[in-house]
Image (cartoon, grey):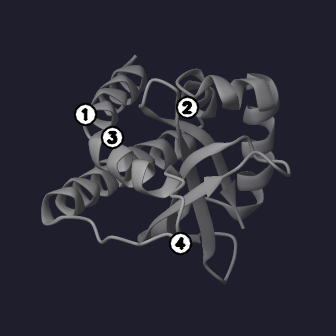
């Protein structure tokens, strides 16, 4: 129940901060007749984008904590419909368990930042705007740190939703 509340609140926070992404997305998707002129974001747009990135990073931290607690199913329950089309709940839980169990318990986890991506639908990624939140994590059973990545997609209702998790 607590994890559902956390993820529901996170979805509301992400919905309220998608304005900057929409401004950036509009800039990126406009197809001018002449060569593209890249315009920097205004201070207000940049501040909104920075706030959005911070909010998404907090949600990503909550996601990895739920995975730490063996609650990958709860994470999948709140995922984007696109994620649910790509992988079943059962397969997602099995994959996370298979990937994480040899690593042992997580120790020090350092955020590594937020990366913005846009895919056009060619290849194996559905079209859309994505955010990857990266963590450098030290696990108990391995000597080198691992890279955890939590991915969100901007759904059609302009809400950032969980779409993937990986650890390498």
Which label sits in the foreground, 1 or 2? 1
The mark closer to the camera, 4 or 2, is: 4
**Residue at the limit of the structure toward the right, as seen here:** 123
Mark 4, secondary structure of its residue? loop
- Determine whether label 1 and label 3 are within 8 Å by CB: yes
Q: Secondary structure at mark 1?
A: helix
- Which disc is residue 18 wearing? 3
Q: Give residue 161's position: percent from left, percent from top.
A: 50, 34
Is residue 87 visible to the viewer in this orientation of the structure?
A: no
The residue at which mark 2 appears reads as 75
Badge 3 crowding class, 10 Å Cα cut-off, few under 14, some 14 to 19, many 20 or more, is many
Task: Check disc 3 and report its element: helix, strand or loop.
Answer: helix
For disc 1, the marked residue is 16
The residue located at (41%, 56%) in the rendering is 27
* Quadrant of the drawing holding the C terminus: bottom right
Residue at 82% of width from left, 31% of height from top?
91
Residue position marked by numbered label 4 in the rendering: 35
Label 4, label 1: how far apart the Cα atoms are: 33 Å
Residue 36's disc is none
Q: Residue furthest front?
A: 33
Q: Earlier in the sequence, mark 1 or mark 2?
A: 1
Task: Find the residue positioned furthest to the top.
Answer: 1
């Amino acid at each position: 129940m607590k994890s559902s509340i956390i993820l529901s609140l996170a979805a509301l926070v992400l919905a309220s901060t998608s304005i900057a992404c929409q401004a950036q997305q509009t800039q990126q998707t406009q197809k001018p007749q002449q060569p593209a002129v890249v315009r920097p974001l205004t201070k207000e747009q940049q501040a909104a984008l920075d706030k959005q990135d911070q909010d998404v990073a907090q949600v990503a931290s909550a996601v990895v904590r739920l995975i730490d607690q063996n609650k990958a199913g709860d994470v999948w329950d709140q995922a984007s419909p696109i994620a649910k089309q790509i992988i079943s709940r059962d397969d997602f839980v099995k994959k996370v368990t298979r990937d994480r169990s040899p690593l042992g318990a997580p120790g020090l986890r350092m955020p590594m930042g937020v990366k913005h991506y846009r895919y056009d639908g060619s290849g194996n990624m559905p079209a859309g705007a994505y955010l990857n939140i990266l963590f450098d994590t030290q696990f108990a059973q391995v000597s080198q740190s691992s890279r955890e990545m939590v991915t969100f997609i901007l759904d059609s209702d302009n809400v950032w939703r969980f779409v993937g998790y990986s650890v390498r």
